[in-house]
Image: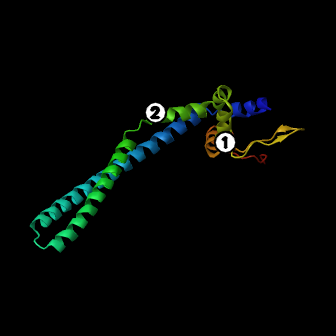
Amino acid sequence: MCAGIEDMLSALTPSAAGLQLFQTFVRDAYRRKVQHSERDKLEVTKNLDKLAARRSRLLDRIIDEEDPEIAFALKARLRDYDLNLKLMERQKEQFHQISHASPNLFEHSRGFLASPLNLWRKGGLSVKQAIMRACFAQPPRYSLKNGFRTPELTFIFKVLADSEGGEENLVEPRGVEPLTS
């Protein structure tokens, strides 16, 4: 039974063009994610600066306030500002982590897509189960008479398989009907 699964996994090896397509897609998605992260980080920084300025003005107002009840209410607002400042600082740190992640993180997934069979052969049971879930949308069906049925692939392997088609499956410009002359 493992030999049949190994045969299916070896058939999943995409072409170089398919892998190039995947790599281009991942790099573009990563670049867009970094751009969005940088833009959001700038907005958080602006909001952080505005809130810090408002906090500073509020602090000046608390110092100048003579009525203790109003000063108490302003101090409560100051605590809210401090809490919001801490939350925004954390949010800004998260953007820093996203923007400095390495695009080489995707090399492992590229290696997996290039040859899931290699990982299958090297891995234990949990790795094999993960590979099955990553490659097949449903567990491959087995028939005692006919062996494994055609498996339903996950989206990424469908895309990679479609990228290999090229133009060899297209009808010629003159069509398929017999010539009538």
The image quadrant where one finds the N terminus is: top right
Q: Is residue 106 above or below residue 67?
A: above
Residue on which disc 2 sits: 104
Name the amino acid, label 2. Answer: Asn
- Residue positioned 25% across, 66% down in the render: 76
- Residue positioned 44% across, 36% down in the render: 103
Give the percent coordinates (x, y) of residue 123.
65, 28
Please give left or right for residue 11 compared with residue 25 in the image. Answer: right
- Residue 167 in view (yes/no): no
- Residue 154 in view (yes/no): yes
**Mark 2 element type:** helix
In front: 171, or 180?
A: 171
Quarter of the view holding residue 171: top right
**Mark 1 element type:** helix
Foreground mark, 1 or 2, reads 1
Give the percent coordinates (x, y) of residue 7.
75, 31
The residue carrying pointer 1 sits among few (fewer than 14), some (14 to 19) or many (20 or more) residues within 10 Å by Cα, namely some
Residues at marks 1 and 2, CA–CA distance in whole angstroms: 24 Å
Residue on which disc 1 sits: 133
Q: Residue furthest right?
A: 145
In front: 166, or 57?
A: 57
Of labels 1 and 2, earlier in sequence is 2
The residue carrying pointer 2 sits among few (fewer than 14), some (14 to 19) or many (20 or more) residues within 10 Å by Cα, namely few
Please give left or right for residue 134 compared with residue 35 in the image. Answer: right
Quarter of the view holding residue 85: bottom left
- Residue positioned 22% across, 59% down in the render: 50
Name the amino acid, label 1. Answer: Arg
